Amino acid sequence: MKNILFLLILTFIFTACDVSVNTEQTNTEETEKVEAVKKELQIAVIDIKGMHCESCVNTITTVLTELEGVKKAKVSLEYEQAKVKFDPTVISTDDIKAAIEDKDYEVGEIEMLEMQERAKKPVK
């Protein structure tokens, strides 16, 4: 009886360890996939002239976030800029520029942020 109980306990321990290892592998694979997607995304800081109010900010934000390939957009009236995170395999900076200009705003310099600058650089 003790042997059977001992075997059941060992089986449970090994099963739990195997599940734990599989979970760690799955989490690692998911993390690697997320990191690969993040590496593919680009961030552009775009100078925009012609904004006068929060309605202008909302218009540009809506236009940008509705573009296929744009993952996130933050527009600053104070600094007359937009910070756009996008997938360059889906959309180009020229497409983003054209969408802004279609709403009668002027696009100035477009600065692409390098990987180490991404986390550090806020929209001015």
Image: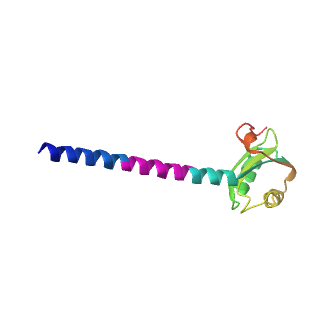
Q: Could you tell me if residue 50 is visible in this image? A: no
Based on the displayed image, in which of its 4 quarters is residue 64 positioned?
A: bottom right
Decide whether residue 111 is among the magenta residues: no
Quarter location, residue 119: top right
90 over 26 or under it: above or below = below
Of 73 and 3, nearer the camera is: 3
Helix, strand or loop for the magenta stretch, by majority: helix
Could you tell me which residue is drawn at 21 percent across and 47 percent down?
7
Q: Furthest residue to the front?
A: 3
Between residues 96 and 61, which one lies in front from this camera angle? 96
Q: Position of residue 49 (x, y in %)?
A: 86, 47
For image coordinates 77% across by 47% down, the residue present is: 82
Residue 123 vs 48, above or below: the answer is: above
Question: Which part of the image, by quadrant, shows the N terminus?
Answer: top left
Locate residue 52, reporting x and y percent. 82, 44
Magenta residues, start to end? 18-31
Residue 42 seen in the figure: yes
In the image, 84: left or right of 24? Answer: right
Colouring chosen for the image of the structure: rainbow
User: Would you say 19 lies left or right of 5 here?
Assistant: right
Image quarter where the C terminus lies is: top right
| Residue drawn where x is 65% and y is 51% of the image | 38
Measured as percent of width and height from the top left, residue 19 is found at: 37, 50
Q: How many marks?
A: 0
Of residues 87 and 47, the one drawn nearer to the viewer in this rendering: 87
Decide which of 5, 108 is in the foreground and name it.
5
- Residue 116 falls in image quadrant: top right
- Residue 22 in picture, x, y percent from top left: 42, 51
